Amino acid sequence: MKFEKRSPMPCSAQELFDWHGSPGAFGRLAPPWQYMEVLREDPGLTEGKRIELKMGTPLGKREWHARHTQCELGKSFTDVQEKGPFKSWTHRHVFEPRGLGESDLVDSIEYEMPIGEIGDSIVSGQLKKSFAFRHWITRRDLELKRALPDFRTLKVAITGGSGFLGTQLKHLLGAQGHEVFVVTRSKDSDSDIRWDPAEGEIELSRLEGLDAIVHLAGESLTSGRWSEERKKRLWSSRVDTTDFLVDAIGRLERPPSVLLSGSGIGIYGSDPEKIFTEEAARGEGFLAELCEAWEAAASRAETVDTRVCFLRTGVVIDPRGGALEKMLPAFKFGAGGPLGDGQQWFPWVALEDWIGAVNWLLLARGAKGPVNLVAPGVVRQKEFARILGKALSRPSFLPAPKFALRTLLGEMADAALLSSIHAKPNQLETLGYPFAFAKLDELFSKVL
């Protein structure tokens, strides 16, 4: 069996080759609907390079080992399956020049099914979907890099770098050519930077010479009821941890030039009548107070040499994690619907735009202070449920009643699920950030 996909790309063949050899490229190419875990990947693009994966298949998770058997610098490389679900698999990646600053990406695959032609129609359909996404994400990365203000490669550390957002941000930054370090309690590799804020421990010398820190550490807000004990943990995991990080930055001889620190649009409270830009005042409630204190802790890092942005994040939408991952089982079963009466504003943002905007803010020298990380096309929660149901070809009219949510989740239900926040991304639009997804239906057609 044979498959081929060809697409024009806005860069030279050499740039396209280099992008495929970057540390984050393989993670970027994984379609959002397909489970993929990289078990081992040799660096760069060279003959003999090995990649070991665990992949989701119709028969469950299977290991897939591949080896590069041929590599022409700037022109092509070929990988073959050594272990995996196919009887044989040879994938040739070709980068063809097509004019000044442009090239064609050509993926050619020859494969043999383990039991003849049974299932080939399913496999060929999956290949078409997967490589349509792979070519789109490759083009998106290259166009974003070209559009970035004053692009330069950076040394970036990410706290919370192994979480849902941090993992995908690491892939993007690596694919853009940045050197990325994960700040973690459990040091899994030599590139990780170990810290333990609760014990007052951090590898301070490893922070010297960094250009930027993206601070995403914090316990999940939506994993259960907010008891008084849990509120203390949420506060400590954000405010106390940020204080510890800022104190460490203050002891550096060469502090980073940028600190992007997590926050949330929950800082605005809830009001169905207002439109919230970054200039809006703080709202009421525990979540608003938490975000205000979180930002205040981060703001202490701001100096003449270090600019600080607060990432006021909306509901990040992607099937690999966050809210959508939790919603999908019910919606696929036909039992999905709006939360409460569904009239509350639902400030969503595509994962692709969240990581893209963070990448943009690292390089946009004029960016500082609060930044609403939300899509321009805000919708009400009822409309969100309708569009998701339509994308899945399932009904979406079964609501989750307010009283049930409040009984089950208490204060968290009102603050995180039933609140109405019509937020606008004024800062990002002023800075010229090019959104990949301004409309929900376009997002769902790409990632589901």
Image (tube, rainbow, N blue to C red):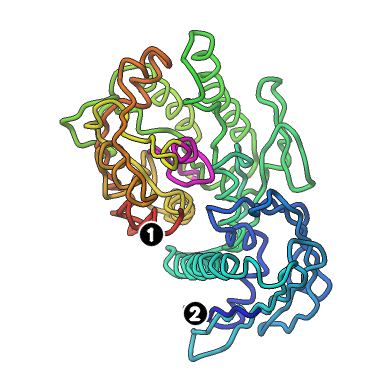
Q: Is residue 160 magenta?
A: no
Q: Is mark 1 on a helix, strand or loop?
A: loop
* Quarter of the view holding residue 246: top right
Q: Which of 69 and 340 is in front in this view?
A: 340
Q: Where is residue 39 in the image (x, y as percent from the top left)?
A: 76, 52
Which range of residues does the magenta coloring cover? 305-329
On the image, the x and y values in percent for residue 37 come to 68, 50
Q: Is residue 290 left or right of residue 235?
A: left
Rendered view: 365 above or below 122:
above
Tag 2 and tag 1, C-beta contact below 8 Å:
no
Q: Mark 2 points at which residue?
A: 7
Left or right of 343, for residue 115: right
For the residue carrying disc 2, how many other residues have a C-alpha within 10 Å: few (<14), some (14-19), or many (20+)?
few
Residue located beneath label 1 in the image:
436
Q: What residue type is labelled 1?
A: Ala
The outermost residue toward the top is: 228
Q: Which of 17 and 106 is in front in this view?
A: 106
- Element type at mark 2: strand
**Callout count:** 2
The residue lying at 60 percent from left, 26 percent from top is: 244
